[in-house]
Amino acid sequence: MRAALLIQRWYRQYAARLEMRRRCSWNIFQSIEYSGQQDHIKLYNFFGYLMDHFTSASSQRNLVSQMFRESDAFQDVEWEKQFCYKDIEVPDVYAGPHLSFPLTISNVTELVDAFKNKQKLHARYVLQLLGKTWTLLRLMPNISHVCTCKHKEITICGDLHGHLEDLLLVFYKNGFPSAETPYVFNGDFVDRGKESMEILLVLFAFLLLYPHDVHLNRGNHEDHIVNLRYGFTKEVLGKYQVHGKMILKLLQKIFSCLPLATVIDQKVLILHGGISDKTDLNLIGKLDRQRFVSALRPLKRREASERPKEAALDPDGDDDDDFSMGRRRVQSLTHGTPVRPRQELPRHSVHSGSGRTGRSVDEELRERRRLAGLSLSSDSELYSAEVQETDADEWKQIVDVLWSDPMSQNGCVPNEVRGGGCYWGPDVTQEVLDRHKLKLLIRSHECKQEGYEFCHNGRVVTIFSASNYYDVGSNRGAYIRLGPDLIPHFKLFQASRSTRELTLRQSVGRTERSALQALRMQLFTHKSGLIREFQEYDPQCTGLISLKHWAMAVEKVLRLSLPWRVLRAQLVTSSTRDGMLNYHDWFNQLSVQPNTEIANASLLETLYKHHSNLESIFRMIDTDHSGLISFEEFHQTWKLLSSHLQTDISDKAIADLAESIDFNKDGSIDINEFMEAFRLVEQSRGEREEPPSPE
């Protein structure tokens, strides 16, 4: 008995240590993910601020306005003509699936089998399928209502994020959607994964086949601005080089037509993100969701009112002059105040001798206007397009539905971690559900280690269906089966066979290594800021600081809210002596190296630190989706980024960088090659290990 108790105690300690390591790895992944979302929203808000205050110069192209072309002037009939698939021929050599409309079950199963075998659907069928889907979605209400019968269970899936393998596994375990097996897919079908387009086509095909039994809710990633950063735009253009632009434009329309929520038996509310203390399902049910092409900004008056029929139509959306005239002040998603350039941050020169200090905000904006070829709007233009109050209320309702997260404390506060939506507490859950006579809220939006999680006294459940989301073995996927008793039954799965063969220790170790490597890259990209903060604790310039000060400085710079004292054992190893850390040696041992070296070290660090923001700007500027940008566009991109960061970058540094990556000397830059060339990579083991001691 004594031996059994000792073994039990040892095993519990062992399991507790593994669980602590797993949770710590999880916190690293989640903190980095949310920090990236916050950066993206801040960048987009900054561009919105520029659009509010600048209009295009008569002789120059308006660079910033290209980023806000989601509201093309096409009416529905003209859109249908623009995206006509009939002129696209299917060659005889095409070996993929063929679709005929109206779809049959054999068409859809053939499509699923083709995607399972890594085949691609021809662009003609893609556009035809998307056009039929758009036509159907426009007729659907904002909130879908579903009823269960005595022997009917409804399956609810959470985020899929381009993980086709997970969707196919759900179908294998649970069956294809049908009248007997209805489904609710709760948003975030795209981004991050590599097969987002295939997931959309499969879901849309089943929607057309069973429009009363397949229900699709919109997620925060069903937004073309978010897609620019998280991979879906790049995926579509890579798979459909010729017709990719047309497909993306049609998907913008489809995303805005997706319903916002689903209600089962008038008792269970299903939506992607969450609620707030202002959530009103009656208002959500009445608003015109199709106007909100992107939930990242409120509507302009031009979007809020009907455009004149005689307005000039431009198939490429080149209505910049008219578009910029109607721009309103864009507000932060988390605060009700206009987003302005940050005045409190010190300005650090990226190129020696190019620093400019002592400017006011207005002077700085005028200078950036001159560099980017923009002219400042007049006061009358600036305030002529204020959004109506009802439009702002509707926009906030949608943002809360798509972006919010639950918290354990009572109340409702802005979600400053993600940068959008709110955090709401159990008191808000009780008030909103009771007011609408509901008993349960099912939402997604957050990755959970077991695929699901209850909170708020069991009245809120999070469901997430993309397994191995952060890394192989990082989490399970799950889906819910809900019967007439409205009690959720969870089905867990792991799509990767290699993961299922790993022991718990091996799985935790693999996830931990991946999380720590991602964290090391974050530390490397903040090298200058960390060194400045370390030097605050090292006034004698000895190169040594205490481990306590190391933890404080790292949190102050990265702001990831991680347990740095717990992590220091994995991040700080041989650089310590007598409890002091040699921070210069520590940076050299982070096991991270650049893919490319350039002479200007400060510019290189800025590039790596804001790699994702830079790619987002490139994608926004590349309006023809050619994958190429000119030197002038490259130069203007850096000027916009430097204005956003309040950092000076000299023209010579930008020109030298452009010349160094124009490999074929044709005066244009390939976006994908540029982003791949400047990507942080892990050093090989042989490179980072020191030679063994002679002893």
Image (cartoon, rainbow, N blue to C red):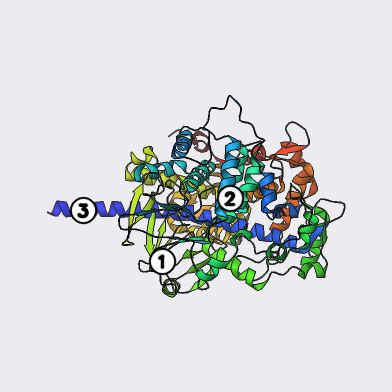
Q: Position of residue 388 (x, y in %)?
A: 68, 71
Q: Quadrant of residue 505?
A: top left
Q: Would residue 123 appear left or right of 411 to someone viewing this image?
A: right
Quarter of the image containing the C terminus?
A: top left
Q: Which residue is mark 3?
A: 8
The kind of residue tagged 3 is Gln
Front residue of this view, candidates 94 and 462: 94
Q: Quadrant of residue 428?
A: bottom left
Q: Earlier in the sequence, mark 2 or mark 3?
A: 3
Q: Earlier in the sequence, mark 2 or mark 1?
A: 2
* Circles 2 and 3: CB atoms closer than 8 Å: no
Q: Using the numbered discs, state the Cα–Cα distance from disc 2 to disc 3 in whole angstroms.
A: 59 Å
Q: Position of residue 357 (x, y in %)?
A: 78, 62
Front residue of this view, candidates 348 and 143: 143
Q: Which residue is mark 1?
A: 266
Q: Using the numbered discs, state the Cα–Cα distance from disc 3 to disc 1 in whole angstroms.
A: 48 Å
Label 3, secondary structure: give it.
helix
The kind of residue tagged 1 is Gln
Tag of residue 134:
2
Q: Position of residue 278 (x, y in %)?
A: 53, 73
